[in-house]
Structures are given as C-alpha cells and as structure tokens.
Image: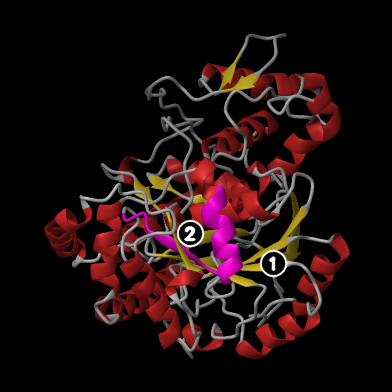
Amino acid sequence: MSPRALGPATLIRHLGAWRTPGSGAAYRQLAGAVRLLILDGRLPLAAKLPGEREVARALGLSRTTVSAAYGRLRDDGFLDGGPGEAARTRLPAAPRARATTEESPRSESAGPGMIDLTAAVLPADPNVHAAYVRALERLPANLPGHGYETAGLEELREAVAAGYRRRGLPTSPGQILITHGAHNGLVHLLRLTVRPGEAVVFDHPTYPQAIDAILAAGARPAPVALPDGPGDEGWDVEGLASACRDSGAPMAYLVLDHNNPTGRMMRAADRLRLLAALKGSQTLLVLDETLVELTLSGPPALTASAVDAPRIVRLGSMSKSVWGGLRIGWIRADRAVIQRLAQSRASFDLGTPILEQLAAVELLNDGGQALAARRPLLRARRDHLRAHLAERLPDWICPRAAGGLSLWAHLPAPISSALTVLAETEGLRLAAGPRFGVDGAFERRLRLPYTLPEPVLDEAVERLARAAHRLTRGGKPAVTKPTRPVPIY
C-alpha cells in the first residue's frame, strides 16, 4: 500500500470514539472527527482515504451516511475529488466565512480573538533580549572560524554539563551534543538506533511530536499505559520492563519528569527498580527532561532524576523553561554515543547556529534565577485554572499537576474530539486527548495548559464551558477554517 493511502483500519484507529449520542447526525459527527484529524496532523495531507463502501462497512454505517460526511468535507475544502472519485485530504486554500445557521451557530460572545490552548509554552523569559545583545557582542570572536560546530560550542557544552553536575550527575562537555531542540535530538537518536519495523517503547500518553517522530522513523509504537485509577500517580514499571524485553525494543522514550501531558513524576525508587529490571537489556533509555526544572509541588524532579546508568540518554531543551523560539537543546550520553551522533548528524544537519548558542550560554549561566522567579507564577496560574474549572465544570476531574505546564483533565464522557471541534466555534483552540496517544485513546481526556495570564485563562474556561454545555445539549459543531494543521507543543 502506498504510504499516502490509508486503509479503513488505520482510519478507524485514528477516529477512536468519534460518535457521541445526542450530539447530532452521524454524518456531521464523522465529518467533524475527520476534519479534526486533518487539522491536528494525525492524517497527513494528500493522503488517500478509503472508499465510502469500505468505511461504511468498517463503521457499521450506511454508505449514504459516509457519502454525506465526505460531501461535507469536500464542500468545506478538506477533501479533493468529486463523488465517486478518490478522496484525498487537503486544507482549504484560504479562510472563508461559513454562513451561520441554526444548525451551526457561532457564539457572539466568543470575542475578537482566538485563544490557543494547543501550546503548553511560556512567553520569552525577560532576559532573552539582553542575552542576545551580549551574544552579538561576543560573536566577532567566533567569526574567524568556519562556524560548523558539529557537537556544539565548547563553552555551551560546558554550561550544560555544569547543570548536570549540580544535579549530582558527573558530566563532561564530551558527553554533550547541542541540537535544534529536544525533538531534533530524538530524531537523531532514532536515526542512529532504530531500524524500520523495530519497536520503540514509550509511556502512554506522551508528547505528540515524539509519537510523530517515532512513526516517521518507520518504528513500531509500543505504548505502555500510565496507571489511571483513582489516586494513581506513578508508572507501570513492570509493564515498561516487560515491553522492552518482549519486543526487543532498541529504544524506550520516557518522559519521567513532569510527563507531558499528565504532569506526573516518577519517584527515584521506581527509577532504580526500572534500571534493575532492565539489567542486561540492550534497550537505550531516552529520557526527555525538557520539563525537569518545572517542579511546582513536592520534592524537585532534579533530585529523583539524578539516577544514572550507561544505557540512559537524556534530552534537554530551553524551549519550555526559557523560550520556544530559542531552538537550543542537547543530548547527554556516554562519550561513545555522542561521538557516533556527531558523525551521523553530518548527513542530516551541520550543527546549531552560533549566535543562538552564545545566547544560550548567557541564559544558562544566570544560576537559575530567572526560572526560580517563574515557578511561583506558574503555580498560581495552575491553581487558578483548577479553581475556575471546578466552578464552571464541576463534573470534570482535574488532578493537580506536580509540575510541568498543563493539566490533564478527565472528562465525564468520551467527548474530547467532538468538544475540540465545537470549542473552535467559541473561539477556543484545544488539543484533543487522542493527539497524545495512539489507536484513538484518551477521548475522555483533554490537556489544558496554564501558561497564559489568568484573565485569558478565565475567558478560555468560559468558552470551554459554553462548548461543553452545547455538546451536552446536542449542539452541532460549526466549521471554521484554520489555514494549516495545528502543531501541539
């Protein structure tokens, strides 16, 4: 099968629990679910969808229902091809106003601007501009050279290594490779470590871009569910170890320090148990630590994360704690792994921009003062968002995240995708729960970042509550026209 052709089983897996009783005609719900998959990137553009008969048979619907859903998607600009022709995914060429009807009303109180809750990121640290000014002053000293620093500037690698040493992890600059963010580091590790068809184990739910990178590498996803019962805050350590052993996975990607999206943190004792269970295994443990410094309650994640072993590789980044526009990340690993990565990256990219590296040095050498000032702000916004959600949506369960940048809300019904579609008509952009997993999981979940100012969070909750109440009453999602798929950060 062409990689651009989707079979009915693949489409159904992505759809998950797409239908909500009492929320409108089946064809409208199906069209809205497919539209959401296209917008958030779970269905690639120009992908050929299965035929109407195949989808109808697989979903237990009439062909008329599927034909009507495809027709609506064509009318709205999300599918190419006329009736009877192959349907390929696309995006509308430009935003177009859709007529308001009783069937698809847009709230007049949605406000003039869209509130975007798809990105769990902070605005730039106030010191970023000053860091770039100082970096420009220091740039001339680097200009006589060719500028290709495959592993990264020595002084930046030393600044990163010093941060690990403060955590109790002896580290030298030779154990650090500077990358274009943590995601770029994961891509390098996948290229070096995993062959197509091999398994990659990961905690489930997890960072959406990591799932995309694993699939793009041709790897086989091997998710291990995080325990989700009342009071569960840990990991299935035995399940992770069994998945690594049984699948022969060359890599496990884990977000143990304020898991994105749940915010939970693995205890040091459980990390030691995991390492003991994997003793003798060839699985490379890749730990994404982009949120490790954002502990808001309880013992700092930095303490637990000091557990180390030769088979552990760590990904770090400045995008969550400093600024997403500063594309500086790093890999900490054994020297031999770093050397192999530096050699292999030459066919992929030639290094990281020097000016950004110099700015990163300035920001990392502040002794953590800027980040210390941000934690109380995040803690206040987290608690404010939880309180407002409890008031306006009392049947939602929103555990208090130990750290990170978002809440992982538990919804009263499997409505996450439908709610995401409807919320956009209220002027609120959301990341549906299934975006953080595979096989259509997490329709009862929704990630809600608390990185925006409190008045904006208040308005976001009001719009969310209106959308949820409309959905409960059987409101119909209207169609709006974003011009590109929505990335999830």
What segment is highlighted magenta in the picture? 326-344
Q: Dot 2 lies on which element?
A: helix
Looking at the image, which is closer to me, 352 or 225? 352
Which quarter of the picture shows residue 312? Answer: bottom right
Quarter assignment of residue 85? top right
Work out how far the residue at label 1 is from the one at label 2, CA to CA, in angstroms: 16 Å
Q: Amino acid at mark 1?
A: Leu
Please say which color scheme the image uses: secondary structure
Relative side of 3 to 323, left or right: right
Name the residue at 45% across, 80% down. Answer: 164
Q: Residue at label 1?
A: 284
| 10 Å crowding of disc 2: few (<14), some (14-19), many (20+) | many
* Location of residue 459 in the rendering, given as x and y in whole percent from the top left corner: 32, 57
Which amino acid type is shown beneath numbered disc 2? Ala
> Is 104 inside the magenta-drawn segment?
no
Q: Tell me the quarter of the picture where residue 462 sits.
A: bottom left
Identify the residue shown where x is 54% and y is 65%: 260
Residue located 49% across and 80% down the image:
402
